[in-house]
Amino acid sequence: MTKTNDEVSGGAVGRNEAVTRLQRIPNVGPRMASALLKLGIARLQDAAGRDPDEMYHELSAIDAKRHDPCVRDIFAAVVSHAEGGPARPWWEFTPERKARDAVREKARGEEARWGSATP
């Protein structure tokens, strides 16, 4: 379950400190820092072990809107860095996401084709 901003950061002063701390992470600016806080991530190590796809879907649900898929790539960059990987620009994670999405889309198309076939 996602923690509230106050639970994560300890109130307004703590939230500001958390946003500042999160912005030290490569690829994270003020808006991404706020998004990470919504997901219960107040420091880099909180992102270790998280699934960027799940983070993306959780944020979309919290905000009741679909975010740009590049947000998922930023989450992947943050998680990778949290798990000890080198700091890499978020766009280096885009080809991996697009390849995975293409496989999912192809499987969905095949499922629809086989599901609608009559014997």
Image: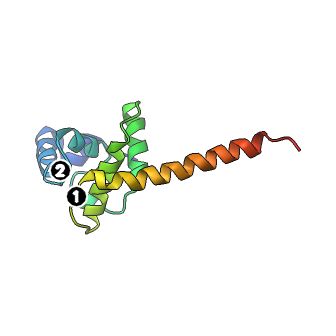
In space, the residues marked 2 and 1 are separated at their CA atoms by 7 Å
When the figure is inspected, residue 76 is found, relative to residue 11, above or below; the finding is below
Q: Is residue 37 left or right of residue 52?
A: left
The quadrant the C terminus occupies is top right
Relative placement, left or right, of 59 versus 77 is: right
Give amino acid for label 2.
Leu
**Mark 2 / mark 1, whichever is N-terminal:** 2
Provide the secondary structure element on which disc 2 rests.
helix
The x, y position of residue 101, in whole percent, is 49, 49
How many neighbours does mark 2 have within 10 angstroms: few (below 14), some (14-19), or many (20 or more)? many
**Residue that appears at 13% across and 53% down:** 24
The answer to whether one can see residue 109 in this image is yes
Q: Write down the residue under mark 1.
A: 44
The reply to whether the C-beta atoms of the residues labelled 2 and 1 are less than 8 Å apart is yes
The number of discs equals 2
Query: What's under tag 1, amino acid-wise?
Result: Leu
Compared to residue 108, the image places residue 68 above or below, namely above
Q: At which x and y percent is residue 99?
A: 47, 53
Q: Residue furthest right?
A: 119
Which residue does the numbered mark 2 point to in the structure image? 22
Please state the horizontal and vertical placement of residue 8, each as a whole percent of the image: 24, 48
Q: Residue furthest top?
A: 64
Is disc 1 placed on a helix, strand or loop?
helix
At a point 27% along the width and 46% down the height, the residue shown is 36
Neighbourhood count class around disc 1 (C-alpha, 10 Å): few under 14, some 14–19, many 20 upward:
some
Tag of residue 107: none
Picture quarter containing residue 15?
top left
Q: Is residue 112 left or right of residue 90?
A: right
Q: From the viewer's side, name the closer residue of 12 and 27.
A: 27
User: Whole-percent x and y of residue 74?
Assistant: 29, 49
Quadrant in which residue 2 is drawn: top left
- Residue 6 visible here: no
